[in-house]
Image: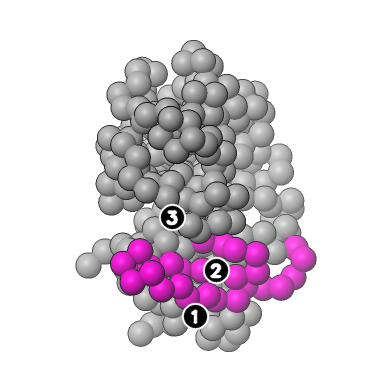
Amino acid sequence: MRTYLQSICLLLLLAPAAAPAQELIRSIPSDHARLIATDELGNVYLVRQDNGLIRYSPDGDSTGNFRSIQNGDLLWVDATNPLRILLYYPNFSKVVLLDKMLSVKNELDLKKLSIFNAPAVGMSADGRIWVYDFVNARLKKIDDQLSVTNTSNDMRQELAEVPRPTALLERDSRVFLCDSSKGIYTFDRFASYLNMLEIKGVRQLQAFGTQLVYKDADSLRAYDLRTLSLKTIPLPPQADFIDARIERGRLYLLFTDRLELYRLPQE
């Protein structure tokens, strides 16, 4: 059984994040933290205001860092594949791929595809890259040579509207395109549109089997695609709280000045 499913079972048993049910592993000071991502190994990737990317192990040990000052602000990290980490710099329409040592493997300039400031990019399970082309209202899959291998229909013709996503994620042959004001558009692995989930307010998404996990205001929510049930877990009410992630028996809470790592209770 995938560890994703084990993790989500633990998530649904969580008390409020500040409760003592979770064991605090470490609180890591970090000035002006603004973004976190996680991978399936339990590593957590923290982005600071200065564009520095730091990777921590599940126990909070620093295991690598990367920083670029020539591509503008780093606004998205997809660590779905810990051997091929995607960084996205929308101001320069630049995708940077890192290896497991956080060294640059490749850089892709989306402007060469006439894609400027794409609102959402993400990794594909086959090692390619998903890009949402807002101008043409199409979801596209590209390879490392900037060849388009799959593309959706024009969403203006498909749905008579243009999605404005903030994130996308591929899991189990499905692509989830998150538009916080409209919902979550779903596609198959060939970029064919399937349907839309009426879940609004989603800006980042995790998927564990049939469960979609996302932050909504002051809560972490788990929505079951099979049963249509929704579970809600309160998050810290502090004004400096930014985001939460769960992975492999760990809960990660990001604040503006620190990253807190918790060990989740065992079943």
The residue sitting at 71% across, 73% down in the picture is 237
Q: Which residue is mark 2?
A: 220
Q: Is residue 144 visible?
A: yes
Q: Which residue is mark 1?
A: 14
Sequence-wise, the earlier of marks 1 and 2 is: 1
CB atoms at circles 1 and 2 under 8 Å apart?
yes
In this rendering, the label closer to the viewer, 1 or 2: 2
Q: Please state the extent of the stretch shown in magenta in the rendering.
A: 214-240
Q: Is residue 65 visible?
A: no
Disc 2 marks which amino acid? Leu
239 with respect to 258 (left or right) = right
Identify the secondary structure beneath mark 2: strand
Q: Residues within 10 Å of mark 2 (few under 14, many from 20)?
A: many
In the foreground, 122 or 152: 152
The residue sitting at 56% across, 43% down in the picture is 166
The residue sitting at 43% across, 55% down in the picture is 197
- Magenta span has 237? yes
- Label 1, label 2: how many angstroms apart (C-alpha)? 10 Å
Q: Which residue is mark 3?
A: 197
Sequence-wise, the earlier of marks 1 and 3 is: 1
Tell me if residue 253 comes above or below residue 33 in the rendering: below
Disc 3 marks which amino acid? Leu
